[in-house]
Structure formats: C-alpha cells, structure tokens
Amino acid sequence: MNNRLKVLRAERNWSQADLAEQLGVSRQTVNALETGRYDPSLPLAFKIARVFEQPIESIFSAQGTPR
Amino acid sequence: MTAVSDRKTPLALKLLGVAGLAAAGGATGFVMARFVDLAALPWTDALAVGLSTMLLAAAVVSAGIMASRPRSTPVGCGLLQIAILALAGLMLLAPIYGPNWFSPDMVFWGVVVLLIAQSVANLMLWRQADEMLQRVLSETSAMAFWALQLALFLYAAAERLGLIEGLTAWGMVGILMGVYLVASVIAAGRRGIK
C-alpha cells in the first residue's frame, strides 16, 4: 500500500514524534508506515485520516494505483 | 506540538554509534574469553551461556542508548524490553552457575521467581505495545513456532529411527531461545526496527 504520510506530515512541519504522539503509536511505527514497511489497521488508518482531516482514500492507495 | 521537522542523523554520530556498538561487542567478547571457557562446557551449557551473554549485552546497550536520548523522548516500551532481555539472560545463567553458591532447590525457586517476573513484564509489554509492536511480537512467535515444530518433527523422526542421540530439555530450551532470538531480529528488521 502507498501512502502520503510523509508529505502530509512535512506540510504541517510535524516531526515523526509529533505525529506518533497524536496517533498514540511509537515513532518507529510512524517511520515504518512512511517507508511502506507496515500497513496500518483500519482503526489506525481512520485515526490518521482524522489527524490530517482528509478522507482515507486521499492518504492511502493500493500499490501501483494512480492517485 | 513541537513543530520540529525530522533531521537526518549526522554521519559522525552514526559512526560514533557504530564504534560504540563495536566497543560493546568487543568488551563482551573479552569478558567471555577472560572468564568463561566455553570449550570446557557441554554444548547445551555453552549455548545457554552464549545466548545469555548476548541478551545481557543487548540489555546493557539498550539501556545506554535510552539513557543517551534527550529527556523529552518518550520511554515507551523500552524499559520493559530491557527488563525482559536481562531477566531472560539471568534465567539462562542461573541453572549453570547458581549451584556454585546456592543449593539446587534455592536456584530452582530463584528461576521460578525470575520466570514469573519475566512473564509479567512480557504481559505488560504486550498491553503497552502499539499495533505494530504487537504485530512484530506475533510474527516472532509464529516464525519461531513453525521453525521449531519443523525441527522437532525431523529430530523426533531421526531419534525414533535411532539415527541421533537424545536431547535434554535444557538443550531444547537453549535451541528454543536461540531460534526465538533470530526470529525476533528478522521480524523487527522487516519493520525497520533496529
């Protein structure tokens, strides 16, 4: 799965630790999400969407799916 | 919100970290060579001593890394992971060296206490872990289970056929811990956890 977490986070000038704190996960988890090493559960994906105030499908897309 | 963007770790700091880990590895090797004659031990004890040394060294290095972080960095599950590593190391050492100072009964009950403490720490770690760490823990268990059940089946078949000698429970525990350690490194590495 692809995601725009890094871009969205950079736009807000948040550190990985900042985002991790808002999501209630570790900084390593945010790093793994951004590098595509871990796909979030549905509840976490919804939380990410809430934090960035965007619909899930604008943050995540299936591998190779053009946005 | 601190509004601080992530910065890449400077190369000098990375090299310093590598040098620190190399020094820790060297010191561990020196202590092992100076105080433990692995060749004189049965292979089951040598395996347990080797594993416990790795676990204790990992606990010390992790504690050092945690202590060197800024105070603002959340501790997270780090303390529990250090405790689990250290307790596992002690549990492997106690049955080998404990009888030098205490009666076997006392050593056994000491191991029971360590085992209970480690189980509680493991449970606390699971409850405090976020979903990715829980996934890593589950994958580690699954990998270790499949590797060990395959090995156990082959070993049992070979033993039943009289092709190999019997293995003690102590030897099995050493192998189990070793396989679990390798599985945990693989599972964590897949998620980019170093």
Image (cartoon, coloured by chain):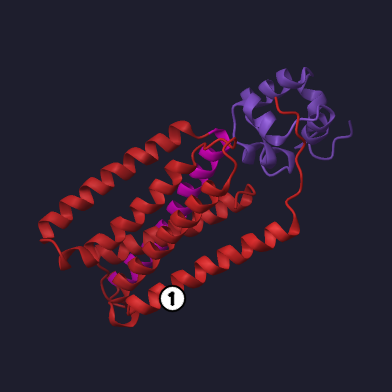
Chain colours: A purple, B red
* Residue bearing the label numbered 1: B30
**Residue at figure coordinates x 84%, y 40% from the top left:** A64
**Residue at figure coordinates x 49%, y 39% from the top left:** B77
Q: Is residue B150 visible?
A: no
| Quadrant of the frame with the C terminus of chain A | top right
Please state if B50 lies on the left or on the right of A42 as rendered: left
Quadrant for residue A17, please give it. top right
Quadrant for residue B164, please give it. bottom left
Please state if B2 lies on the left or on the right of B170 as rendered: right
**Residue at figure coordinates x 32%, y 42% from the top left:** B119
Query: Label 1 lies in what chain?
Result: B
Quadrant for residue B100, please give it. bottom left
The image position of residue B137, as x and y in percent, is: 49, 43
Q: Is residue B192 above or below residue B34?
A: above
Residue bounds of the magenta highlight: B130-159
Q: Main secondary structure of the magenta part?
A: helix
The image position of residue B144, as x and y in percent, is: 45, 54
Query: Between residues B78 and B120, which one lies in front from this camera angle?
Result: B78
Query: Between residues A50 and B103, which one lies in front from this camera angle?
Result: B103
Please state if B178 lies on the left or on the right of B104 as rendered: right
Residue at the farthest bottom position: B39
The amino acid pointed to by label 1 is Phe
| Quadrant of the frame with the N terminus of chain A | top right
**Residue at figure coordinates x 68%, y 44% from the top left:** A37
Q: Is residue B46 above or below residue A2?
A: below
Instruction: Say whether residue B34 is magenta.
Output: no
The image position of residue B88, as x and y in percent, is: 35, 53
Instruction: Say whether residue B134 is magenta.
Output: yes
Please state if A7 lies on the left or on the right of A50 as rendered: right
* Secondary structure of the residue carrying numbered label 1: helix
Q: Is residue B9 visible?
A: yes
The image position of residue B139, as x and y in percent, is: 52, 46
